[in-house]
Image (cartoon, rainbow, N blue to C red):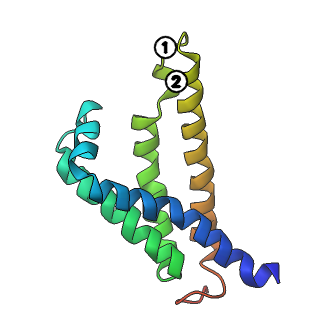
Amino acid sequence: MLQQFGPLFGRTLLALIFIFSGFHKLTGFDGTAGYMASHGLPMPQVLLVATIVIELIGGLMILIGWQARIAAAAIFLFLIPATLVFHAFWNVNPADAMLLQNQMNHFMKNVAIMGGMLYIVTHGSGPFSLQKSR
């Protein structure tokens, strides 16, 4: 039973964070663009549109299991610079222990999610998906 439903539940849990995050960025576009600009990113509106597409569309693709390997690869690659730019715990003042721990937790969460994305890239979406894994 776990082999039947495990991939569906796993895809759902991995996809939800990106679907919600992409939707939040879409509905709070100006604030998110400002936050990105505060981190020194050039063309934050353009990068934000790309981020929304990757998170929202990629998350939905993984959820329904259509082209999940491609979506997971895109999210994996997206997470590399996003994690390094927005969760650079090594740049936090060590005296600010709460911020340091928070950024390290977010960094490690993203690393774990990257592992899940690599799993989907390698093994596909599994049963109960629009596109069966090969």
Image quarter where the C terminus lies is: bottom right
Number of the label disc, if any, that sits on residue 76: none
* Residue receiving disc 2: 99
Q: Is residue 37 above or below residue 100?
A: below
Q: Nearer the viewer, residue 96 or 70?
A: 96
The residue positioned 57% from the left and 86% from the top of the image is: 129
The residue positioned 52% from the left and 24% from the top of the image is: 99
Occupied quadrant, residue 40:
top left
Q: Residues within 10 Å of mark 2 (few under 14, many from 20)?
A: some
Number of the label disc, if any, that sits on residue 93: 1
| Amino acid on which disc 1 is placed | Asn
Tags 2 and 1 in contact by the CB under 8 Å rule?
yes
The residue positioned 19% from the left and 53% from the top of the image is: 46
Q: Nearer the viewer, mark 2 or mark 1?
A: 2
Q: Is residue 42 above or below residue 94?
A: below
- Report, in whole angstroms, how far the alpha carbon at label 2 lies from the one at label 1: 8 Å
Residue 40 shown left or right of residue 124 in the figure: left
Q: Say what secondary structure mark 2 lies in.
A: helix
Image quarter where the N terminus lies is: bottom right
Residue 89, x across and y down, in percent: 51, 26
Q: Residues within 10 Å of mark 1 (few under 14, many from 20)?
A: few
| Amino acid on which disc 2 is placed | Leu
